[in-house]
Image (tube, coloured by chain):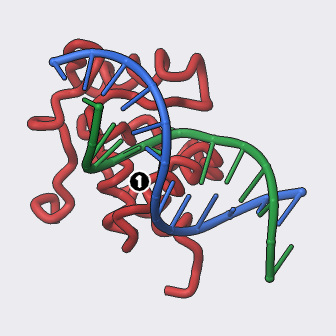
Chain colours: A red, B green, C blue
Amino acid sequence: MNETFFPKVYKLSKKIPPGKVATYSQIAKLAGNPRAARAVGIAMKRNPDIKNIPCHRIIASDGSLCGYSAGKGVAAKQKLLNKEGVAFVNGKVDLTVYQWHPKEGR
DNA sequence: ATTATGACCCGAT
DNA sequence: AATCGGGCCATAA
């Protein structure tokens, strides 16, 4: 509880199943601070465990990609999500279908 | 302890 | 509907 938010964000990111995406605000909310969406993004940017933290599954609340520090940026991110099975529409993801549901996902 | 930066979000125009 | 600006949180130096 006294630990930093980052560990929480990392943990939540690892919980995101393949083929699904979560918004920064969503993660921030799960972390305990719905307004710390920014801090969440920074946590992803740092990504201490890129091999275990699918930061590419974290997208903006609009369903559009915000940024990506690995590969070619949003381009690689978009590609990865597309490979996961996420369909990009108009350069955005269908949050109505692909947004991660932590409660339903047990 | 303060300052500066950052992969964001929301409201207003 | 699209665009612009401001605000909020946390981390690092």
Q: Amino acid at mark 1?
A: Ser
The correct choice, above or below, for A44 with respect to A64 in the image is: below
Left or right? Give the position of A46 relative to A30: right
Pinpoint residue C2: horizontal percent, then vertical percent.
27, 15
Callout 1 secondary element? helix
Pinpoint residue A65: horizontal percent, then vertical percent.
39, 28
Question: Hey, which quadrant is residue B5 in on the image?
Answer: top right
The residue depicted at 20 percent of the width and 20 percent of the height is A87
The correct choice, above or below, for A67 with respect to A34 in the image is: above
The residue depicted at 56 percent of the width and 87 percent of the height is A2
Question: Hey, which quadrant is residue A37 in on the image?
Answer: bottom left
The correct choice, above or below, for A22 with respect to A87 in the image is: below
Crowding near pointer 1: few (<14 within 10 Å), some, many (20+)?
Answer: many
Camera-side residue of A10 and B7: B7
Question: Hey, which quadrant is residue B2 in on the image?
Answer: bottom right
The correct choice, above or below, for A51 with respect to A25 in the image is: above
Camera-side residue of A21 and A41: A41
Q: Which residue is mark 1?
A: A13
Q: How many marks?
A: 1
Left or right? Give the position of A59 relative to A66: left
The residue depicted at 38 percent of the width and 49 percent of the height is A24
Pinpoint residue A35: horizontal percent, then vertical percent.
39, 62
Pinpoint residue A45: horizontal percent, then vertical percent.
60, 43
Chain identifier of the residue bearing label 1 in the image? A
Left or right? Give the position of C8 relative to A29: right
Q: Quadrant of the C terminus of chain A?
A: bottom left
